[in-house]
Image (tube, grey):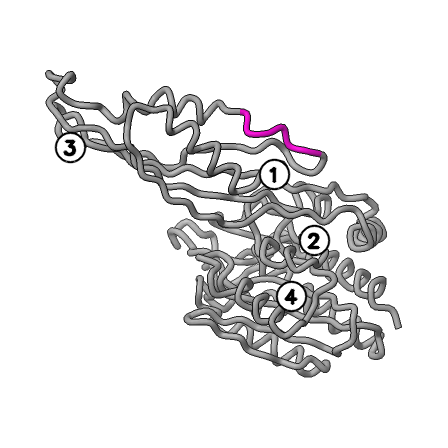
Amino acid sequence: MSKTLETAIELISKASITPDDAGCQTLLADRLSKIGFHIEKMPFEEVDNLWARRNSAPPLFVFAGHTDVVPTGPLEKWQSPPFQPEVRDGQLYGRGSADMKGSIAAMLVACENFIAEHPNHSGSIAFLITSDEEGPAKNGTVKVVETLEKRKETMNWCLIGEPSSKDKIADVIKNGRRGSINAKLKIIGKQGHVAYPHLANNPLHAFLPIMDELVNKVWDKGNEFFPPTTFQIANFNMGTGSENVIPESLDLQFNLRFSTALTDKKIKKQVAEILDKGDFEYEITWRLSGNPFITPVGDLVDIAQTCIQEVCDDIPELSTSGGTSDGRFIAPTGAQVLELGPLNKTIHQINECVGVDDLEKLTQIYQKMLEALLPD
């Protein structure tokens, strides 16, 4: 059994459902302290965070990731228990194997191998690990970054082990992410009897033309890095439970995944302009999950592509697709941020898995990146 596979099995065996770290960070801290890392625990409320750094000189390369995983779903549907990892047909099965304990194991082993061969490397290496990525993400990476910024600790490069690959390992790397903004909207009408609609104001009937405009609006055309902004209604509720009552109000929740061609302020303004056309009162509250970010082609992207080509014989595609990641908290510091990890086909699913050979290739890629960025 390889060192990376053994480490991944140890991590997956810990039932670290958000926000419980379940001892994963202790395992990492013990291993990192043995190779010269200064270990700093940064708990915020119920969330465990780990900041481990080797050396103090710039430039600083950071491995970032999360030890928390999503719930398992129905246990009886798993072919093997989700926290009793098992290798079958070249795949390592278990909750968190792909998202993202497999890549954390690869990062740790790559770092151990690199330091064993290059104990006097230039610059510094750090690990930023949280147990709050799959949850609210309020007391995890964002709080660690705030702490680092207050004490002027600057990241130059950050590699996040999110599952970025599509069809084979390292065929896609994420060099940015779209922004995400959510809104809760209440349309206020007037309750009444369905037989006397002139004495009421059906909130749905009043809202329908406005909803059509929101759904079909071209928010932007995207740009060279991002697809066009998208609008999606995620939840919609109305009704009193009676078949002869026009309800007083309806509630809906919608989300926009937006590019750098827009800002959250512009989105709010444009939505308000559309809503104000309607024959109804409304209430709206907003929550910004994260702004879009992009790492243009440069030293980190170039080195990642070169290392992937050396290991996998292919040049990866650059992509900004998918949901949000903790990169949204790190990129605003000025760091170059990339996401490179396992295949994302089974993440959050029953029988989540990662390829055993893929873990070895990830370990090699991560080590080669360290060698290129932090030479002796």
Give the amino acid at mark 4. Answer: Ala
In 3D space, how far apart are the residues under numbered discs 4 and 2 (Cα atoms)? Answer: 18 Å
The one of 246 and 69 positioned closer to us in this rendering: 246
Residue 84 vertical position relative to residue 51 in the rendered view, above or below: above
Residue 259 numbered mark, or none: 1
Marks 4 & 1, CB-CB < 8 Å contact: no
Residue count near mark 4 (Cα–Cα under 10 Å), binned few <14, some 14–19, many ≥20: many
In 3D space, how far apart are the residues under numbered discs 1 and 2 (Cα atoms)? Answer: 17 Å
Residue 105 numbered mark, or none: 4
The one of 307 and 312 positioned closer to us in this rendering: 307
Q: Please identify, in this view, whether the residue under mark 4 or under mark 2 is nearer the observer.
A: 2
Q: Give coordinates of residue 255: x percent, y percent.
A: 46, 38
User: In the displayed structure, does residue 186 sit left or right of residue 372?
Assistant: left
Q: What residue is pinned by disc 2? A: 338
Q: Earlier in the sequence, mark 4 or mark 1?
A: 4
Q: Which residues are magenta?
A: 218-223
